[in-house]
């Protein structure tokens, strides 16, 4: 059997490439929008960020699907794992449908909540409505990807993601210059439809799992209860973070279109840095879930520590590289020297942010996989609200520190929460939850 480090990397690298492709496409499309005008670039950022926030409603089940399936597979409960997969699709339809309708009906009010500049709103509001159908499709795709990853089929999901992203690029490049932001929405919709079709084929081919008609809307009680036991706390943690992050974006909105554009372009570079910790965190969650289901708690502890070592090293190296290259990389989005100068400054602050973020990306996922899902949101919510959201307004707006003040609040929040999560793991406070999870999964067989 491969060593834990080897298995971790074999899972992490396809997920890293998946997310790299996604961010690469986002960067390219942001660049195309920015070259139309900075107003269009800012509208693209506001519209896509709000669509991503609505998509996070999926975390109500998404945070639990992969964990529950890995725990069942680790315990040898394949039939129960398949039942959970079917339940995830039905729940995804309802959650994705709600998110889609919210984007269609409330696009303008939601964007106003973010203090979207008046010259950006006429572009951002139609974009969010055009993106609405893709939100539902993205929820279905994410649900199916979670199931495939839980079965350790990350290479198959990578192949689908490659196809989807190639389609986005192939369609967006000719459509965006002609249709503007509507061209991007159309390219995204087509790619997501093809993604759903390919995932359905892979479920049948690789997992021998075919969806029945009623699986698309059915909400089985027992399976959903298992998912929500993990998913609700996980969703609360993710949604709290996203809402607090968007509160920071709202603070930036008061600084004007120039600041919104600077934030949008710099965040594109930050996502590349974040990928390393995120892919390792997802891989650790999957492996820890299998180990907890099998009762291998010592192995789970060793693997998490190896994952943290890899994640911290990668975060520091990647952040330093992108900070050094920022003056040149930002020219891909804009030629405005003031935006490039401020973005370069913010990227050096990112070198401080990313190691703290790695603790959250890796340890929180491992805690969730061990069954200790409530602690991250219970402990982290105060920091997110006071330090992340409050700090962005106090430092950025009240004290006039602008974007630097917002970045300082990002760093303080990540480190406070990250060190608290590490303390939880290092003291083995997650072990009672892991043992209870193992007993519960085993009891299903009995």
Image (spheres, helix red, strand yellow):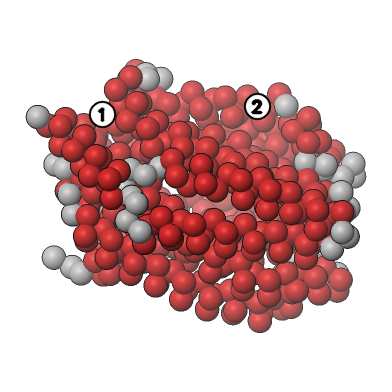
Residue assigned mark 1:
83
User: At which x and y percent is residue 262?
Assistant: 78, 62
In this view, 388 is above or below 266: above
Q: Which residue is depicted at the point 80% across and 70% down?
A: 342
Question: Sequence-wise, which precedes: disc 1 or disc 2?
Answer: 1
- Left or right of 140? Residue 266 is right
Question: Mark 1 and mark 2: span between their CA atoms?
Answer: 29 Å
Whether residue 339 is visible to the viewer of this picture, yes or no, is yes
Q: Residue furthest left?
A: 446
**Secondary structure beneath label 2:** helix
Residue assigned mark 2:
102
In this view, 240 is above or below 157: above
Whether residue 340 is visible to the viewer of this picture, yes or no, is no
Q: Which residue is depicted at the point 52% across and 29% down?
A: 96
Question: Which corner quadrant holds the N terminus?
Answer: bottom left
User: At which x and y percent is residue 204?
Assistant: 25, 37
Residue 51 placement: quadrant: top right
Disc 1 packing (10 Å; few <14; some 14–19; many ≥20): some
- Left or right of 294? Residue 408 is right
Q: Which residue is depicted at the point 46% across and 26% down?
A: 93
Q: Which residue is depicted at the point 37% across and 20% down?
A: 219
């Amino acid at each position: 059997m491969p060593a834990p480090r080897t298995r971790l990397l074999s899972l992490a690298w396809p997920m890293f490439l998946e997310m790299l492709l996604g961010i690469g496409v986002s960067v390219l499309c942001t660049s195309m929008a920015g070259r139309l005008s900075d107003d269009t670039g800012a509208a693209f950022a506001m519209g896509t960020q709000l669509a991503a926030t609505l998509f996070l409603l999926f975390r109500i089940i998404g945070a639990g699907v992969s964990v529950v399936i890995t725990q069942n597979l680790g315990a040898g409960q394949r039939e129960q794992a398949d039942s959970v997969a079917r339940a995830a699709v039905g729940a995804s339809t309802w959650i994705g449908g709600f998110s889609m309708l919210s984007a269609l009906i409330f696009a303008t009010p939601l964007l106003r909540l973010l203090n979207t500049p008046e010259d950006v709103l006429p572009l951002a509001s139609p974009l969010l409505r055009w993106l609405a159908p893709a939100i539902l499709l993205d929820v279905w795709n994410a649900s199916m990807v979670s199931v495939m990853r839980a079965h350790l089929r990350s290479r198959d999901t990578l192949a689908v993601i490659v196809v989807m992203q190639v389609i986005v690029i192939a369609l967006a490049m000719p459509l965006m210059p002609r249709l503007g932001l509507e061209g991007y929405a159309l390219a995204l919709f087509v790619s997501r439809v093809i993604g759903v079709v390919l995932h359905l084929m892979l479920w049948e081919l690789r997992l021998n799992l075919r969806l029945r008609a009623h699986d698309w809307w059915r909400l089985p009680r027992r399976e959903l209860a298992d998912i929500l036991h993990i998913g609700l706390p996980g969703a609360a943690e993710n949604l709290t973070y996203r809402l607090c992050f968007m509160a920071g974006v709202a603070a930036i909105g008061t600084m004007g279109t120039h600041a919104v554009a600077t934030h949008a372009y710099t965040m594109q570079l930050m996502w590349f840095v974040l990928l390393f910790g995120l892919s390792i965190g997802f891989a650790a969650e999957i492996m820890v879930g299998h180990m907890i289901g099998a009762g291998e708690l010592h192995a789970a502890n060793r693997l998490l520590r190896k994952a943290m070592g890899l994640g911290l090293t990668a975060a520091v190296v990647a952040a330093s590289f992108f900070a050094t290259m920022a003056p040149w990389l930002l020219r891909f989005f804009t030629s405005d020297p003031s935006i490039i100068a401020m973005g370069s400054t913010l990227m050096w602050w990112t070198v401080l942010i990313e190691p703290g973020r790695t603790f959250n990306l890796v340890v929180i996922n491992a805690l969730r996989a061990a069954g200790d899902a409530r602690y991250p949101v219970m402990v982290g919510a105060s920091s997110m609200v006071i330090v992340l959201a409050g700090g962005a307004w106090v430092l950025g707006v009240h004290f006039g520190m602008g974007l630097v003040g917002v970045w300082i609040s990002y760093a303080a929040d990540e480190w406070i929460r990250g060190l608290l999560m590490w303390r939880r793991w290092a003291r083995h406070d997650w072990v009672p939850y892991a043992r209870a999870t193992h007993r519960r999964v085993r009891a299903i067989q009995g």
